[in-house]
Amino acid sequence: WYCPHSPDDGCECRKPKPGLLLRAAAALGMAGRPGVMVGDKPADVEAATAAGVAGVRVRTGYGAGASDDDVETAVRRWLAGAG
């Protein structure tokens, strides 16, 4: 899934709004179930929170230097309940 809109369009699917995550969760049969959004921007974590799932920011891409976790470490930490 992706948002084809520009930041000025005011759509519900562009992060940090949760529309895209909610639509994906519904399509995958995951709506209302625990989950985690792993991303490299603050907007990723904000969208996760708005969608009712955990948000983890990692140090790849835009997150370089902003987090101590790489993707694998972040997911392992979340799965272990420390996320």
Image (cartoon, rainbow, N blue to C red):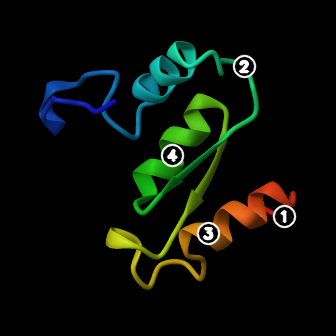
Residue designated by label 1: 82
Q: CA distance from mark 3 to mark 1?
A: 14 Å
Residue designated by label 2: 32
Q: Position of residue 71 (x, y in %)?
A: 55, 67
Q: CA distance from mark 4 to mark 3?
A: 21 Å
Q: Earlier in the sequence, mark 2 or mark 3?
A: 2
User: The disc labelled 4 sits on which kind of residue?
Assistant: Glu
User: The disc labelled 1 sits on which kind of residue?
Assistant: Ala
The local secondary structure at tag 4 comes to helix
The local secondary structure at tag 3 comes to helix
Frontmost of labels 4 and 3 is 3
**On residue 72, which mark appears?**
3
In the rendered structure, the answer to whether residue 41 lies left or right of residue 27 reads left
Q: CA distance from mark 2 to mark 3?
A: 24 Å
Identify which residue, 48 or 75, lies in the foreground: 75
Frontmost of labels 3 and 1 is 3
Which residue lies at the image location 40% right of the left edge and 26% below the top edge?
Answer: 20
Mark 4 packing: few (<14 Cα in 10 Å), some, or many (20+)? Answer: many
Q: CA distance from mark 2 to mark 1?
A: 21 Å
Frontmost of labels 2 and 4 is 2
Q: Earlier in the sequence, mark 2 or mark 1?
A: 2
Considering every residue shown, the one lying at the far right of the view is: 81
In the rendered structure, the answer to whether residue 81 lies left or right of residue 41 reads right
In the rendered structure, the answer to whether residue 28 lies left or right of residue 39 reads right
Q: Marks 3 and 4: in contact by CB < 8 Å?
A: no
The local secondary structure at tag 1 comes to loop
Q: Position of residue 11 (x, y in %)?
A: 26, 22
Q: Marks 1 and 3: in contact by CB < 8 Å?
A: no
